[in-house]
């Protein structure tokens, strides 16, 4: 059984039975069968379904948002925004997707896009709807079918997604939720009826899934962790940079792969930035995620909070200094305060890890070279945010920051039309836009 625990109160919620081996087999075969008919549907059939799923997300927004808040603790307002973005994601592929599949002519022939088959998605709890939609919307448009192994703590969300896809009129087997533990994933990847796998989550899970995909010679897209730099140069609008840095660090209680986790600030504006940033972080209101005045709910579980507290303690043991915050809040629930760490030893292993909680690491850089060196001094390469009004500096950052994404004078966000993904240990492949659609399609060369 999977039992949801409300991280704001510690109260158990709904329970979900794990699939038996026979039930799992039935679902895999159903996906295989559904693919045979879905692969030959025309684009209008697929885009109509995408539009209807978007309508279902809109119509059920409040109910869906509440399930996410109760299962993983994000604020209700952010859960509502996530659900709205899901509807936009389906509409993006409904309206702009077919043009992305136009044949590509070349001298002597054409390349045409075709589906590949059932795709398995292994997804995390932090954006429990949006992470799934990033895979599901292009899957449906491509003519593929989808199977979801969602994180154990968001099984209510997983069930709700399946329910609304069915309510939108999807044919049986087009999208199925698989309530299973992660030890069943390798066998699924090895199954001949599943053609590819996409995972969003930790490096550890990514390695295991990639290994299984490698053994089966199947394509895999990995969207793993990040320790994104947020670089502030003297020409930046400091007020806006500091305000945005707070949001970029504490969004989703610090549990986003593209949260700004390391603030790298030019020495000339370091003190001024710190003053503004610290004031913003100290003003963050942690509390009941259902309340509209709350900025930050609990972490997704007590175990997740403990992981973050242990990381902070290890950084402190290595000479890092917590200026304030970064502590468990008393009482029920997995709450902690927003905080800032300075003097973090960059070469220590824990400083190179993803800090999945609302605590920023702050660094001083003497010049742009030092800022870039610091930015690249982690094994990850997911996103980044740079703050400068100097065109030459901007060009340097764009060229030299080791990341899949850069936001300039803004917070990085995951948007339906923008390719999303990383390099280095943040994974490989892209989601969203045309690139996400093409990842799991067969580009068939037709000569003549
Ligand atoms: P995991 O990577 O363990 O979980 C993500 C998904 O992968 C879940 O569905 C999980 O299932 C599944 N999974 C875990 N291990 C395996 C495996 N060996 N084979 C197949 N599937 C697997 O993340 P956690 O929830 O444990 O979080 C740990 C850390 O990962 C965080 O502190 C954060 O640093 C990072 N993380 C990053 C995310 C991102 O967006 N980049 C999202 C979530 C976590 P199950 O829940 O059943 O274990």
Image (cartoon, rainbow, N blue to C red):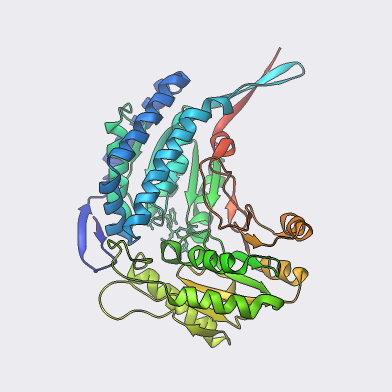
Q: Is residue 2 left or right of residue 387?
A: left
- Ligand 1 lies in quarter: bottom left
Q: Residue 68's spot in the image, x, y percent?
A: 31, 54
- Residue, x 33% and y 28% (percent of image)? 170
Which quadrant does the N terminus fall into? Answer: bottom left
In depth, the one of 169 and 144 nearer the eye is 169
Q: Residue 185's spot in the image, x, y percent?
A: 41, 48
Which quadrant does the C terminus fall into? Answer: top right
Query: Does residue 265 sit above or below 248 in this rendering?
Result: below
Image quarter for residue 353?
Answer: bottom right
Q: Is residue 52 left or right of residue 397?
A: left
- Residue, x 33% and y 79% (percent of image)? 329
In depth, the one of 191 and 116 nearer the eye is 116
Query: Does residue 117 sit above or below 45 in this rendering?
Result: below
Q: Residue 325's spot in the image, x, y percent?
A: 44, 81
Q: Decide if residue 191 is in sight here.
A: no
In depth, the one of 341 and 266 nearer the eye is 266
Q: Decide if residue 235 is in sight here.
A: yes
Query: Does residue 165 sit above or below 428 in this rendering?
Result: above
Query: Does residue 434 sit above or below 36 in this rendering?
Result: below
Q: How many marks?
A: 0
Q: Residue 394's spot in the image, x, y percent?
A: 73, 57
- Residue, x 39% and y 49% (percent of image)? 82
- Residue, x 56% and y 79% (percent of image)? 275
Q: Is residue 12 left or right of residue 295?
A: left
């Amino acid at each position: 059984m999977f039992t949801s625990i409300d991280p704001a109160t510690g109260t158990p919620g709904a329970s979900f039975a794990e699939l038996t081996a026979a039930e799992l087999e039935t679902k895999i075969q159903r996906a295989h069968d559904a693919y045979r008919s879905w692969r030959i549907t025309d684009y209008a059939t697929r885009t109509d379904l995408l539009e209807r799923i978007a309508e279902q997300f809109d119509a059920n927004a409040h109910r869906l948002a509440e399930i996410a808040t109760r299962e993983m603790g994000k604020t209700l307002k952010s859960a509502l925004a996530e659900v709205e973005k899901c509807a936009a994601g389906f509409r993006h592929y409904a309206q702009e997707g077919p043009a992305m599949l136009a044949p590509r002519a070349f001298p002597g022939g054409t390349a045409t896009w075709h589906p590949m088959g059932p795709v398995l998605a292994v997804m995390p709890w932090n954006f429990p709807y949006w992470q799934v939609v990033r895979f599901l919307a292009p899957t449906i448009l491509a003519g593929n079918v989808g199977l979801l192994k969602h994180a154990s703590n968001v099984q209510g969300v997983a069930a709700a997604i399946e329910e609304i896809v069915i309510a939108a009129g999807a044919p049986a087997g087009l999208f199925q939720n698989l309530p299973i533990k992660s030890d069943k994933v390798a066998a699924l990847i090895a199954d001949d009826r599943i053609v590819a796998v996409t995972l969003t989550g930790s490096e550890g899970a990514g390695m295991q899934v990639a290994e299984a995909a490698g053994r089966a010679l199947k394509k895999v897209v990995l969207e793993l962790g990040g320790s994104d730099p947020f670089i502030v140069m003297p020409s930046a609008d400091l007020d806006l940079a500091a305000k945005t840095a707070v949001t970029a660090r504490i969004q989703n209680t610090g549990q986003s792969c593209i949260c700004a986790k390391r603030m790298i600030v030019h020495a000339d504006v370091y003190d001024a930035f710190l003053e503004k940033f610290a004031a913003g972080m100290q003003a963050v209101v942690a509390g009941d995620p259902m309340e509209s005045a709350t900025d930050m709910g609990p972490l997704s579980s007590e175990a997740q909070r403990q992981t973050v507290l242990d990381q902070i303690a290890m950084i402190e043991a290595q000479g890092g200094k917590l200026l304030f915050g970064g502590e468990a809040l008393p009482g029920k629930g997995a709450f902690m305060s927003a905080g800032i760490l300075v003097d973090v030893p960059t070469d220590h292993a824990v400083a190179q890890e993803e800090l999945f909680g609302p605590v920023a690491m702050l660094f001083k850089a003497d010049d742009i070279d030092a800022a870039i060196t610091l930015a690249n001094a982690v094994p990850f390469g997911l996103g980044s945010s740079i703050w400068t009004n100097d065109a030459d500096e901007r060009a340097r950052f764009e060229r030299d920051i080791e990341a899949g994404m850069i936001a300039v004078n803004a917070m990085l966000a995951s948007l339906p039309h923008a390719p999303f993904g990383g390099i280095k240990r943040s994974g490989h492949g892209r989601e969203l836009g045309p690139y996400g659609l093409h990842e799991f399609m067969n580009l068939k060369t037709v000569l003549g």
